[in-house]
Amino acid sequence: MSELTFEQKQQQLEAIVSRLESGNVPLEEMIRLYEQGESLYRECAGTLDAYEKKLNDLEKEKA
């Protein structure tokens, strides 16, 4: 299976949050969705951190 793009991960995370916020999720599924959401969040945050570092490095090169 191919790696999801940042945008696809973000969309999945938003869908998970919506499901959890609905309150109509059985406990076992809620825990599974929460764990999946946490994983997606960490991946997205890591991607953003990496891009932020890259942009900062590019700015330093310009100076």
Image (cartoon, helix red, strand yellow):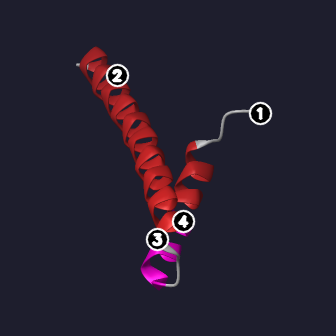
Mark in front: 2 vs 4: 4
SS category of the residue bearing label 1: loop
Location of residue 47 by image quarter: top left
Residues at marks 1 and 2 touching, judged by CB atoms closer than 8 Å: no
Do callouts 3 and 2 mark residues in contact (Cβ within 8 Å)? no
Q: Which residue is mark 1?
A: 1
CA distance for labels 1 and 4: 23 Å
Residue at (62% x, 42% y) in the render: 5
Q: Nearer the viewer, residue 57 or 6?
A: 6
Of residue 20 and residue 32, the one placed in the foreground of this image is 32
Question: Residue beneath label 3, please?
Answer: 27
Mark sitting earlier along the chain (1/4)? 1
At a point 45% along the width and 44% down the height, the residue shown is 39
In the rendered view, would you say 29 is above or below 54? below
Q: Nearer the viewer, residue 26 or 62?
A: 26
Disc 1 marks which amino acid? Answer: Met
**What is the CA distance from the residue labelled 1 to the residue labelled 2?**
33 Å
Residue 46: image location, x then y, percent: 38, 35
Residue 42 placed where, x, y %? 39, 42
- On residue 29, which mark appears? 4
Gap in angstroms between the C-alphas marked 4 and 3:
5 Å
For the point 52% across and 84% down, which residue is it?
Answer: 24
Q: Quadrant of the C terminus?
A: top left
Relative to 34, is 40 above or below? Answer: above
- At label 2, the amino acid type is Leu
